[in-house]
Image (spheres, grey):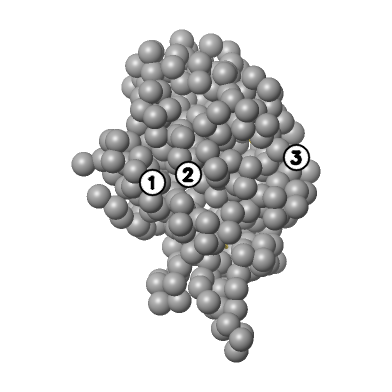
Amino acid sequence: MKKTVAFSKDATNVFFHILTQCNLKCKHCYINTKQHGKQVLPLETIEAWLNVFARKGRAANVIFIGGEPTMHPDLPAAVKKAKTIGYSSITVDTNGYLFHDILSKVAPDEVDYFSFSLDGATRKTNDMIRGNGSYDNCIAGIRKTIRKGFAASLIYTVSRMNVHELDKMPPLLADLKIERFFIQVIGIRGKAAKIDREKLQVSRTEWLSIIPDLAEKIAGAGITVTYPKVFLSLDELFECAGIVAENYFIFPNGRVYRCPLCEDYPLHSMVLKNHKLLATGRINEADLFALNTPEGCVMNKLIQPDNLSYSSNGVPEYKIACCMLKEEIRKI
Ligand code: SF4
Ligand code: SF4
């Protein structure tokens, strides 16, 4: 069953960067410590900030992220706090190294998913992007996680460097017993913003000819697959998640963004101060969300206009979807 995952209108998604430190140095890392800070958040702050978003009167999902969140010694306590105060789902994103013996300090009924990042079907490609040893550690981490009774999902960030290996993923996913597979499109931010885009971004033609078919194939093996829609025809509905959804991207320096494409800039529309969520002054990302551009996503037009195309009379040939709009193919 294939469906476009509309933005959730009645749930809050909290992407909580509890630190920005990481043991890896991936080529496309989106972390930008100038903008996001270098603090390792104390547990007291993590708990207070979790409370802020749990109290918004809606179901809330939290994704602990970094940096590498398992490097934070208080991650188990943070998970337990999120569970106690009623978060609907708890996910831990990880590069697979699983520091501080995290799997022994939380229980399978406390974490909905450990979500692993792997950027190649082979050691060679993955390690060229994510660093030597990262493939073996990720695979070992996934196997250990499943053995301990947790559910595992896998994120594959598609770029020119690894798009050719996507078709090798189905047997690997089946072997690893992955329940959910997330295909991501590379974001031009952090370190990726310093790399020649031609070497990073997959063209529209390639994306459309490879990704939807491959997602169907993987879903056919019983794995739920999610991938970003990226391109919309001119008559398809465009919506900006910054306006219609409740996503919060929290960083250790207290910045709270509604849009991940804004994270390289001081455009955050909120900030956490003294454990309170406050609006920032103008101009911020919210001013941009309101601009109604015929090309769809306004941030895309500002920071990566090369993926747009126009007819001879200046009309866009398609729109760019919000980066958070996904297609999901579920096992049936
Ligand atoms: S694992 Fe994530 S946080 Fe660490 S370097 Fe890679 S992309 Fe950056
Ligand atoms: S990615 Fe574009 S459409 Fe989505 S929230 Fe950001 S500005 Fe809005």
The residue carrying pointer 3 sits among few (fewer than 14), some (14 to 19) or many (20 or more) residues within 10 Å by Cα, namely some
Q: Are marks 3 and 1 in contact (CB under 8 Å)?
A: no
Q: Residue type at mark 1: give it.
A: Ala
**First in sequence: mark 3 or mark 1?**
3
Q: Who comes first in sequence, dot 2 or dot 1? A: 2
Tell me the element at label 1: helix
Where residue 261 sits, quadrant-wise, is bottom right
Kind of residue sitting beneath label 3: Thr
Q: Earlier in the sequence, mark 3 or mark 2?
A: 3
Residue annotated with mark 3: 33
Distance from mark 3 CB to nearest ligand 1 atom below 8 Å: no
Residue under the image location 29 percent in, 36 percent down: 221
Numbered mark located on residue 183 in the image: 2
Q: Nearer the viewer, mark 3 or mark 2?
A: 2
Up-down relation of residue 247 to residue 143 (above or below):
below
Q: Left or right: where does residue 194 sit relative to residue 24?
A: right
Pick the quarter of the image with the C terminus: top left
Q: Is residue 184 above or below residue 283?
A: above
Disc sitting over residue 215 in the figure: 1
Q: What distance separates the C-alpha of mark 3 from that of mark 1?
A: 34 Å
Q: Are marks 3 and 2 in contact (CB under 8 Å)?
A: no
Nearer the observer, disc 3 or disc 1?
1
| Residue 2 position in % (x across, y down) | 29, 52
Q: Nearer the viewer, residue 292 or 208?
A: 208
Taking 272 as reference, is 38 left or right?
right
